Image (cartoon, rainbow, N blue to C red):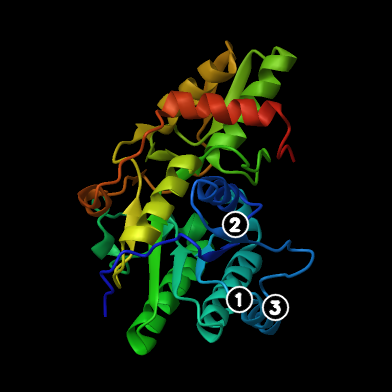
Amino acid sequence: MANTAKFDLRGKRVYVAGHRGMVGSAIVRRLAREDCAVLSIDRAELDLVQVDRVAAWLKDVKPDAVFFAAGKVGGIVANSSFPVDFLQDNLLMALSVIRGSFAAGVKKLMFFGSSCIYPRLSPQPMTEDLLLTGPLEPTNEWYAVAKIAGLKLAEAYRRQHDCDYISVMPTNLYGKGDNYHPEHGHVPAALIRRFHEAKEARAPVVKVWGTGRPRREFLSVDDLADAAVFLMQNYSDSGFINIGTGEDITIGEFAHLVAAVVGYEGRIEFDTSRPDGMPRKLLDVSKISALGWRPRIHLKEGLADAYADFLRGSVRK
């Protein structure tokens, strides 16, 4: 059953799972503008794969709302190298937080999925009803399967227990707090680091993985956080909802844009021996647009902020 009433965050106790990650930290920044108490706990004190300990902690702190932004994330290489970790850890986290939230009487929960849950050869742009209509992209299927299970678990609690649990589906993200690992990071962060180091070394060529032809949509993580708070307040339904810009760009075009932002003036070559991943990933954002939310941060402006974050050394691994 859908609850159509507006969910007011004022005076609420709000737990952000994964508050030190890129998404979680952006949500914490955004919640500073709301009159609510933000709850968090470091992984050293509570590992979210520990189902019983998570349940006990949630019962003790009694949050009113939960943003479930925690997860084991990474790019193509990380997904391919650590399939057990990506599948097992994300499944356990979903079970811990969602089941624990129900036991603790949480009034509203938001689960964060990923656009990689869609079939590899989905029609573009991808509408929410395409879930489970075809095979997944092999290079990230472990993470995708775990995310599908998580959003289905949230949906199941809604159906069986009438919980106000919702799921959102962000597109590719970039911004403050990203992991700038050259192999295990996402495309924007990895390229920022690669072009920066090439600029410092005065390298004449930078190689970018793949053909450069796949198309991707990129959303600032601060825009995502704003959308998440908006949906927590204004959306309640069993179906998950896409969050994106509705616009995409080829990886080749994106690489040249990142190089320009960083100030790298050398040549860019594409390593076609490396995998491309999905040919295209563009989300249909009709549902969230109809609710009244739109992104505000332009790609070049957002990348400049991300590069400044990298230079500050916030997450240089």
Total numbered labels: 3
Q: Which residue is painted at 50% across and 44% down in the image?
A: 275
Q: Which residue is painted at 59% across and 55% down in the image?
A: 73
- Mark 1, residues whose alpha carbon is within 10 Å: few (<14), some, or many (≥20)? some
Mark 1 residue element = helix
* 76 or 16: nearer the viewer: 16
Mark 2 residue element = helix
Residue sitting at the far right:
44
Q: Is residue 51 above or below residue 84?
A: below
* 177 or 248: nearer the viewer: 177
Q: Horizontal placement of 180 versus 288: left or right?
A: right
- Which tag, 2 or 1, sits closer to the chain's start? 2
Q: Is residue 251 above or below residue 68?
A: above
Cα–Cα span, label 1 and label 3: 8 Å
Residue 300 at x, y percent in the picture? 45, 24
Quadrant of the image occupied by residue 273: top right
Cα–Cα span, label 2 and label 1: 19 Å
Q: What quarter of the picture does the N terminus occupy?
A: bottom left
Quadrant of the image occupied by residue 133: bottom left
Foreground label between 1 and 3: 3
- Mark 3, residues whose alpha carbon is within 10 Å: few (<14), some, or many (≥20)? some
Give the residue number, with chain letter if any, for mark 3: 50
Give the residue number, with chain letter if any, for mark 2: 80
